[in-house]
Each structure stands twice: as C-alpha cells, then as structure tokens.
Amino acid sequence: MSNTYGEWLKAQREAAGLTQQDLATSAVMTRSHIAHIEAGRRVPSKEDARRLDRALNTGNVLSSFLPEDDVAAADYFEAVRVLEQQAVMIREFALAYFPGILQTERYARALLGTAFPPVSEEECDRRVVTRLERARILEDPVTPVVWALLDETLLRRPVTGEDVMAEQVMHVVRLAETGRIRVHVMPFGGGHHPLVDSMLTLMWFEDQPPLAYSEGGGTGKLHDSPSMVRKLQHRYDLALSNAMPLKDSLALLRATAKEYGHHD
C-alpha cells in the first residue's frame, strides 16, 4: 500500500517537535504502533486517527485522510503481507482455495491462471514469488503458530490438474504431521457455518492488538476495530467447534490426495 499516510503523520509529528513516544503517550497508543503506522505497515483505526488528530491539533485531517476500507484485495493485501511476517499467531479460514502461506508453487501458479481479469505471465511470476516468500514464515519451527480451518469445498472443487491438487494436499498434510501447523476440515455434513461467506485471517502480535483480514468477491478488508476483531474471532471459534478433529482431518486429506492420484 502507499505510505503517503505514514509519511504525512511523521511530518506532522516532527513539525510539532514530538518523538514517537511523546505522540504515543499523548494519543494513548504504543510507540511501536506509531512506528508501524509511519512505516506504512499499519493503517490506524478511525478511533486511533481521531486520537492522533487531537494529540497533534490537526483538526480532523488524519481522520478524513484514512485510506478507504474496501479496495481490490491484490492491492490492499500488501499491508496484510507485512503484518503476516510480524504475527506470532495466525488462524486461517479458507473457503475456495488453500491459504497463500500454505500454497505450493504449482498450485499458486494454477490458481493465478484463473484470475479475472487475466494477469500477464510476468505479473503471475511476480505474485507466485510473493506467495512463496510469504510461506517462508513456516521455516521457523515455532513462530508463528498457524491454524488452518479448511472448508471441504476447496478439496472437492479442484482449481487445477489432479497431480497438482494431490501435491498441494499432501504439502498441507506434511506440515501438519511435523507439527508445524494445525489443520481442521469443515465437512459438508456440518451444514451452514458462520464463515461460509468469506475467507478470513486472524493475526495476533506481541506488542499490538490483534487484527483480522476478510476477503471475498474480489475485495479485501483489514479490520482493526477491537469489537469487529472480537466478533470475527468468535465466528472463527464457533466454526472451528463444528470442524473435524485433527486426526480425522488428516485422514480425509490423505484420502483426498489419493483420489487425486497421490501414491505413498
């Protein structure tokens, strides 16, 4: 995302002769939160922006200058990608396709090949590289803790050839078998559930409030309102309570991979 907002905030803070800690104290925020906003890694909530306006005596400029909430997911996700690298816990709900941090190269490439409007081969290559770089957070054996709640729909509606689907499913199985991630499948038999209308990512941090990112219909939205984040966390918990246990989920994933042609 553009860092115009963060740069403008920094300029106003420095013009007022304030350090990041000074501003944080006056606005009732943490210094690291101010630093993330100025660096373009975070977008302040409306309440944060109002407190910053009061602390800097800027009227309602920071409030009215906030980036729009709903923009194309591909554009807005840059902020989420950065936050993903800082998270200590990530919980994913995937409805139509495997979460980006769990995708194999061939699966990611095939998925991007179905994009509309179509993307160029060069743009496809760039996005594949980005997804593979995102997945590198799983190279750390401990952090972030990752839970993946997968709707059975994404297993039954292949986005590409059977061999690629088999490889993708087994990639998730191996991550779970080694204990790197925890995976649960939401079966068709579970009926309607609170997350059935969109993809969802929940993130927790060491020094910042939790965030949520939802995506659907070609748009994405980053949620930092505490009440909305709690609401989405509760929806995730409720959906998870109806999912299959880890052992049964892995058995279903292995069986699905076998159906797609995987051989042990």
Image (tube, rainbow, N blue to C red):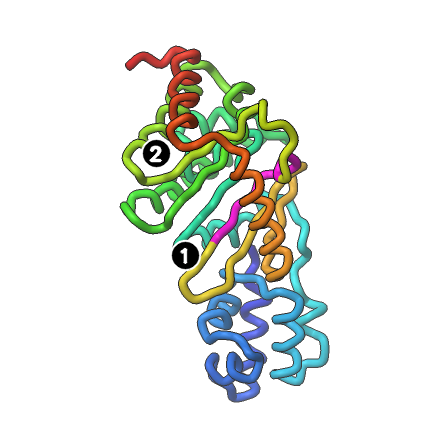
Q: Is residue 112 visible?
A: no
Q: Quadrant of residue 192?
A: top right
Out of 185 and 68, give the one closest to the viewer.
Answer: 185
In the displayed structure, 261 sits above or below 220; it is above
Q: Secondary structure at mark 1?
A: helix
In the displayed structure, 152 sits above or below 80; it is above
Question: Spatial distance from mark 2 to mark 1, Cα to Cα?
Answer: 22 Å
Q: Amino acid at mark 2?
A: Ala
Locate the C terminus by quadrant. Answer: top left
Which residue in the structure is indicated by mark 1?
86
Q: Quadrant of residue 59?
A: bottom right
Out of 120 and 160, give the one closest to the viewer.
Answer: 160
Q: In the rendering, which numbered label is found on residue 65?
A: none
Residue at (28, 35) in percent of width and height: 178
Q: Amino acid at mark 1?
A: Gln
Residue at (64, 39) in percent of width and height: 194
Q: Nearer the viewer, mark 2 or mark 1?
A: 2
Count residues near mark 1 (Cα–Cα under 10 Å), then give few for <14, some for 14-19, many for 20+. Answer: some
Q: Give the image location of residue 79, x and y in percent.
A: 52, 54
| Magenta span of residues | 195-203
Residue at (47, 45) in percent of width and height: 91
Q: Residue 196 lies in magenta, yes or no?
A: yes
**Residue 96 vs residue 137: left or right?**
right
Q: In the rendering, which numbered label is found on residue 176?
A: 2
Q: Quadrant of residue 193?
A: top right
Q: Give the image location of residue 78, x and y in percent.
A: 52, 50
Residue at (62, 45) in percent of width and height: 220
Q: Residue 160 lies in magenta, yes or no?
A: no
Q: Earlier in the sequence, mark 2 or mark 1?
A: 1
**Residue 126 vs residue 11: left or right?**
left
